[in-house]
């Protein structure tokens, strides 16, 4: 009898555990993490002493972007005199709580210190490259992604570069900045970031697309595109936003929604943006540009997820429920790009068994790391794949995305999830994991069916 009772008790206990684990996440960051993504906020150092602000920040977000503190005027106010106090405060606040950091921004025509505004030509080019090198080196291992270059294209229909002192140093200033950033920090994802690049049909979007395509073809080190996504009546959320995200992703770069705010904070529009990101596997996450409406650069538009008192708005509930109910991401764009892409990503999965290879890149810091594993299909493509990695002694995996794992230390096997088992011949997919300890020296092996 006691055996029967304990079996019943065990079953009841198991069903409680399963019910608990099936409970929807209650914060944006936790829910996004379940989808292998982040949900971040722009943070101002001078608000870290505001407990209403930090309570929301610490509870809801798992990524942080310094709103102004890493910009050129903040970090190099006098030439070759670097100040990191405020940026370091934000980085330390974030990382000590397990949040990741997006760096913003290394090279930009705006918010240049006076000394740089007055420079031109070779002197300016060298000063810009020195700035990129110094700042990316300072934050090496602490910043997951950098907005290396910000807002370098003109508005309107020209598709041209924006005129600026940096642009006048030569058209190759952007790729020079990316190369300097890679040399300084090989572990950070390097992004190009811009606004009004959300509508796939806009000339500015197309111009950025062609630059990224060109960079990928020529081996310029670019890993991601940031869409600022400041939506308002003059620049509304476009119905083809998902096409824009998936079209950039199809070039072989990640996409990140970097400065989201929506005039009036329509719950429907916030839900659409979340759903669009979830639908594109290379959309890594969303950052909102501030926490409460009163923190916004456009406070009068009440564009954020929390009101001035820190209460959740309907848009918050919409974003969270979209995250919670979102399906796993699907890879190919739902609508094929309509404009210039010369190599649209329409190749269907091959379906046949094949071989694969895997490489791992690490973003490490003292006591922790983020590993990104790239799985590349051989000449037959894959239906499914398994990557085996042996972690060094003392290293433990704390969370992972885009793959299922067999354990959290020692030899760990990583198997595709439903949406990324099919890889076309020669194409790649990525999964990742975060952990404690040191993961240096791992050599992945890959098997495929
Ligand atoms: O801190 C000083 C304060 O001491 C002074 O009294 C006050 C007087 O104007 O200025 C304060 O600094 C302001 C700073 O924000 C902090 O509030 C600057 O003037 C102001 O120019 C600065 O604006 C920032 C803006 O970038 C500058 O271009 C916004 O906070 C920031 O949200 C905004 O962020 C940009 C992204 O970097 C790029 N994409 C667009 C986005 C929105 O403009």
Image: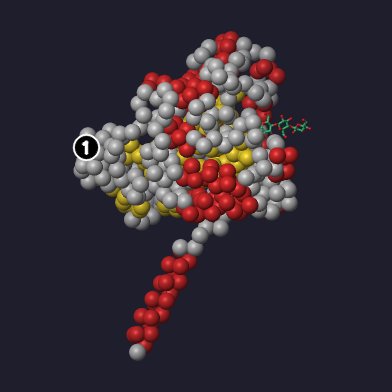
Could you tell me which residue is drawn at 64 percent across and 31 percent down? 234
Residue position for label 1 = 380
The one nearer the camera, 437 or 38, is: 38
Q: Using residue 239 as the reference point, say whether residue 299 is left or right of it.
A: right
Q: Using residue 320 as the reference point, say whether residue 342 is left or right of it.
A: left
Q: Using residue 290 as the reference point, say whether residue 136 is left or right of it.
A: left
The one nearer the camera, 384 or 307, is: 307
Residue 170's place in the image compared with 80, above or below, is above
**Residue 189, how many percent across, how many down?**
47, 34
- Is residue 158 visible from the viewing direction of this image? yes
**Residue 436, how many percent across, how many down?**
46, 50
Residue 287's place in the image compared with 407, above or below, is above
Query: Farthest residue toward the top?
Result: 121
Could you tell me which residue is drawn at 73 percent across and 43 percent down? 294
The one nearer the camera, 31 or 64, is: 31
Count of marks overlaid on the render: 1
Q: Is the residue marked 1 within 8 Å of ligand 1, measured from its CB?
A: no
Badge 1 marks a residue whose secondary structure is: loop
Q: Using residue 292 as the reference point, say whether residue 162 is left or right of it.
A: left
Q: Where ligand 1 lies, by quadrant? A: top right
- Is residue 184 visible from the viewing direction of this image? no
* Colour treatment of the image: secondary structure
Could you tell me which residue is drawn at 29 percent across and 43 percent down? 422
Q: Which quadrant would the N terminus be assigned to in this image?
A: bottom left
Residue 42's place in the image compared with 234, above or below, is below
**Residue 338, how many percent across, how many down?**
42, 28
Query: Farthest residue toward the bottom?
Result: 1
**Residue 359, how many percent across, how many down?**
33, 38
Residue 29's place in the image compared with 209, above or below, is below
Few, some or many residues within 10 Å of mark 1 (<14, 14–19, 20+):
some
């Amino acid at each position: 009898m006691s055996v029967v009772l304990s079996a019943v008790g065990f079953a009841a206990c198991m069903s409680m555990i399963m019910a608990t684990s099936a409970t929807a996440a209650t914060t944006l960051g936790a829910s996004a993490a379940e989808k292998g993504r982040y949900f971040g906020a722009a943070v101002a150092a001078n608000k870290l002493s505001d407990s209403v602000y930090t309570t929301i920040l610490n509870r809801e977000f798992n990524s942080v972007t310094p709103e102004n503190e890493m910009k050129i005027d903040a970090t190099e106010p006098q030439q070759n005199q670097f100040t990191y106090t405020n940026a370091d405060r934000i980085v330390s606040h974030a990382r000590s709580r397990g949040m990741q950091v997006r760096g913003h921004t290394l090279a930009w025509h705006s918010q240049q210190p006076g000394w740089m505004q007055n420079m031109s030509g070779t002197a300016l080019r060298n000063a810009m490259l020195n700035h990129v090198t110094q700042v990316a080196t300072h934050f090496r291992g602490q910043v997951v992604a950098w907005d290396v270059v910000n807002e370098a294209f003109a508005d309107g229909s020209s598709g041209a570069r924006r005129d600026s002192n940096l642009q006048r140093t030569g058209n190759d200033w952007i790729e020079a900045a990316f190369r300097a950033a890679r040399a300084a920090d090989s572990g950070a994802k390097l992004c190009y970031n811009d606004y009004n690049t959300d509508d796939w049909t806009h000339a500015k979007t197309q111009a950025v697309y062609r630059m990224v395509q060109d960079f990928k073809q020529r081996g310029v080190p670019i890993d991601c595109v940031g869409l600022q996504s400041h939506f308002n009546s003059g620049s509304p959320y476009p119905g083809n936003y998902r096409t824009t995200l998936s079209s950039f992703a199809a070039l072989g770069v990640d996409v990140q929604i970097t400065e989201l705010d929506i005039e009036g904070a329509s719950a429907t529009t916030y839900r659409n943006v979340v759903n669009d990101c979830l639908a594109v596997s290379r959309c890594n996450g969303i950052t909102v540009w501030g926490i409460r409406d009163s923190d916004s650069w456009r406070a009068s538009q009440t564009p954020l997820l929390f009101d001035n008192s820190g209460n959740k708005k309907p848009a918050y509930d919409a974003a969270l429920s979209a995250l919670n109910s979102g399906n796993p991401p699907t890879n190919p764009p739902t609508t094929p790009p309509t404009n210039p892409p010369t190599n649209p990503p329409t190749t269907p999965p091959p379906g046949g068994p094949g071989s694969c290879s895997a490489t791992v890149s690490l973003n490490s810091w003292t006591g922790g790391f983020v590993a990104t594993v790239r799985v590349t299909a051989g000449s037959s493509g894959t239906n499914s794949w398994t990557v085996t990695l042996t972690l060094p002694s003392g290293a433990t995996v704390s969370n992972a995305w885009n793959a299922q794992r067999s354990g959290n230390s020692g030899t760990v096997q990583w198997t595709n999830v439903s949406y990324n088992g099919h890889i076309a011949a020669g194409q790649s997919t990525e999964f990742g994991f975060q952990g404690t300890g040191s993961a240096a020296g791992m050599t992945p092996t890959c098997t495929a069916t």
